[in-house]
Image (spheres, grey):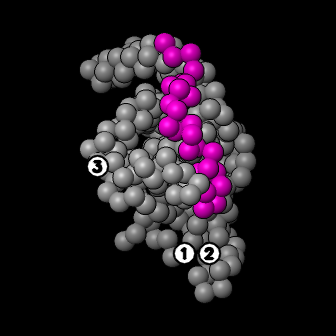
């Protein structure tokens, strides 16, 4: 039985977090490249990550979110049933990443000093721009040994490891705020609300049957509309029947 998990952010910060998470996941899958085209894919993903990092104020968002989680964990420490060992490990991780992030005035700034990446980055934004006649320096690098290329890739990924690990920790805290609840929507539509602000709506559909959700709303109120995709026509239609799914609002 197939299971589909959809995540819909309700604020710009979490939207950016999820975009970065997807890029990090892709580049880690591709980092052990073998062919020249695989290395081009790694570089394309790396430049997407760099562009996002340069556009976003991740340092401020990370520090603010870590501070919020630290305060919540301190409050939970007073609960008699709390797992003190797990709580202490979580606090230790938060303190570690907070200290490392605060040391960096600008996350990802080291890439600005990398002459090789700066020489080729602009061409990757042009469709078909990464060619041997446009970027002979790139194709010279592609002809170096596998060990040299892998060492360079590992070095570049090492420069954004702090962002990757901090992001994974913050999203883990966010997703674990609440558990999934079984929900039934009538006529393919469900509306929900919450007293506390919601940043992420997670929807899990067990029997997909070409059905997918579309979410709209704000941090306190949201609506979920289910659509059915027709692969033959390429058109989606609103579902009018009952849809059962699991819902988590974080």
Residue 228, label in figure: 2
Q: Is residue 162 left or right of residue 130?
A: left
Is 53 drawn above or below residue 10 in the view shown? Answer: above
Give me the C-alpha separation between circle 3 and circle 2: 46 Å
Q: Is residue 90 left or right of residue 136?
A: left
Is 90 drawn above or below residue 19 in the view shown? Answer: above
Q: Name the N-terminal-most of marks 3 and 2.
A: 3
User: Residue 86 appears at what percent x and percent y?
Assistant: 30, 24
Indicate whether residue 121 is drawn in magenta. Answer: yes
The residue identified by callout 1 is 210
Q: Is residue 40 left or right of residue 150?
A: right
User: Residue 236 appears at what percent x and percent y?
Assistant: 67, 76
Give me the C-alpha separation between circle 2 and circle 1: 6 Å
Q: Name the N-terminal-most of marks 3 and 1.
A: 3
The residue identified by callout 3 is 146
Q: Secondary structure at mark 2?
A: strand
Q: Nearer the viewer, mark 3 or mark 1?
A: 3
Whether residue 194 is visible to the viewer of this picture, yes or no, is no
User: Residue 95 appears at what percent x and percent y?
Assistant: 41, 15
């Amino acid at each position: 039985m197939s299971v589909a998990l959809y995540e819909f952010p309700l604020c710009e910060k979490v939207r950016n977090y999820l975009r970065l998470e997807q890029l990090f996941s892709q580049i880690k899958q591709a980092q052990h490249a073998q062919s020249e085209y695989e290395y081009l894919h790694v570089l394309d993903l790396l430049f997407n990550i760099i562009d996002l990092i340069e556009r976003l104020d991740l340092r401020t968002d990370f520090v603010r979110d870590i501070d919020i989680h630290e305060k919540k964990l301190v409050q939970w420490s007073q609960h008699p049933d709390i797992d003190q060992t797990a709580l202490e490990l979580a606090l230790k991780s938060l303190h570690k990443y907070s200290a490392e992030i605060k040391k960096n005035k600008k996350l990802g700034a080291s890439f600005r000093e990398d002459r090789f990446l700066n020489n080729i980055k602009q061409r990757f934004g042009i469709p078909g721009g990464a060619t041997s006649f446009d970027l002979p320096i790139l194709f010279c690098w592609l002809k170096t040994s596998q060990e040299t290329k892998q060492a360079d890739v590992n070095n570049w990924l090492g420069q954004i490891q702090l962002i990757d690990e901090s992001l994974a920790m913050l999203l883990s805290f966010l997703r674990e705020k609440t558990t999934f609840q079984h929900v039934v929507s009538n006529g393919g539509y469900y509306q929900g609300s919450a007293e506390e602000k919601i940043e992420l709506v997670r929807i899990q559909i067990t029997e997909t049957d070409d059905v997918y959700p579309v979410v709209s709303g704000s941090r306190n109120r949201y609506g979920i509309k289910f659509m059915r995709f027709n692969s033959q026509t390429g058109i989606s239609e609103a579902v009018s029947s009952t849809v059962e799914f699991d819902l988590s609002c974080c």
